[in-house]
Image (tube, rainbow, N blue to C red):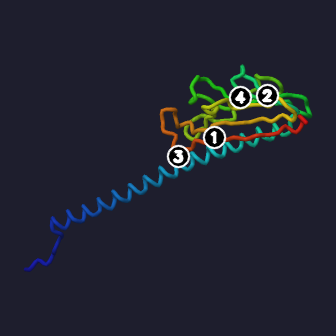
Amino acid sequence: MKNNLRGFTLIELILAISLMAITFTVTSDILISLIKSQSKTQVMNNVEEQASFIMTRIENDLRNAGGAYLTNDGDNTGLTIQNQTTKGEVGYYIGGAGSTVDDKGLYYWYGGDITKVVELTDRTDPGGVRAACPEDGGCFSVSEGTPQVVNVSIRFTPSSLTSSSSPVNLGVIEMNDTIVIRGSY
């Protein structure tokens, strides 16, 4: 009786396993790269979204204000806005629990009561955003003349980015705006 059953040789099996291993390695590297890229894009989009929302809110409050002045001991990290209609005050300031840039957030207080505070930046990981003044100066400046002109400059960074990390292409956004207060004419 002749046995016509033929199997694979050891060399064929080793070659097939090697080709599958190479294919799996290349494919997994591409998938990991895509996942990391998508994660970075989400973080950058979140920073841009929060920065845009905050700057629009500050701009709207300033445009409809009767006046504004700096707060927080002259370090230009706080701004108080006098509402033209209600004569109440609201304010914004950069601060937080820690003393480093990495622990800062942007806060909003309202009703003329500094104890009614809302943190506008969510600093929790993942996806949190921190706010700080630019390294070359304060966040706010207010002109003394009429009309009042307010300069706002805030740096937004992902909360996952620390000062020891390289900020290159990692979602650091510096927003600058100059607003004329309409009620100060």
Q: Position of residue 107 (x, y in %)?
A: 70, 30
Q: Which residue is mark 3?
A: 169
User: Is the residue marked by circle 4 packed among few (<14), some (14-19), or many (20+) residues within 10 Å?
Assistant: many
Give the spatial CA distance, label 4 vs label 3. Answer: 27 Å
Give the spatial CA distance, label 4 vs label 1. Answer: 16 Å
User: Is the residue marked by circle 1 packed among few (<14), some (14-19), or many (20+) residues within 10 Å?
Assistant: some
Mark 4 or mark 1: which comes first in sequence? 4
Q: Which residue is mark 1?
A: 174
Q: Mark 2 and mark 3 in contact (Cβ < 8 Å)? A: no
Give the spatial CA distance, label 3 vs label 2. Answer: 33 Å
Q: Which residue is mark 2?
A: 80
Say what secondary structure mark 4 lies in: strand
Q: Position of residue 167 (x, y in %)?
A: 52, 40
Mark 3: which amino acid?
A: Asn
**As rendered, which of 14 and 1 lies closer to the eye?**
14
Say what secondary structure mark 2 lies in: strand
Q: Residue furthest left?
A: 1
The label nearer to you, 2 versus 1, is 1
Which image quarter: residue 43?
Answer: top right
Q: Is residue 96 above or below residue 159?
A: above
Mark 3 or mark 2: which comes first in sequence? 2
Mark 2 or mark 1: which comes first in sequence? 2
Mark 4: which amino acid?
A: Tyr
Say what secondary structure mark 1 lies in: strand
Q: Is residue 31 left or right of residue 42?
A: left
Give the spatial CA distance, label 1 vs label 3. Answer: 13 Å
Q: Which residue is mark 4?
A: 93
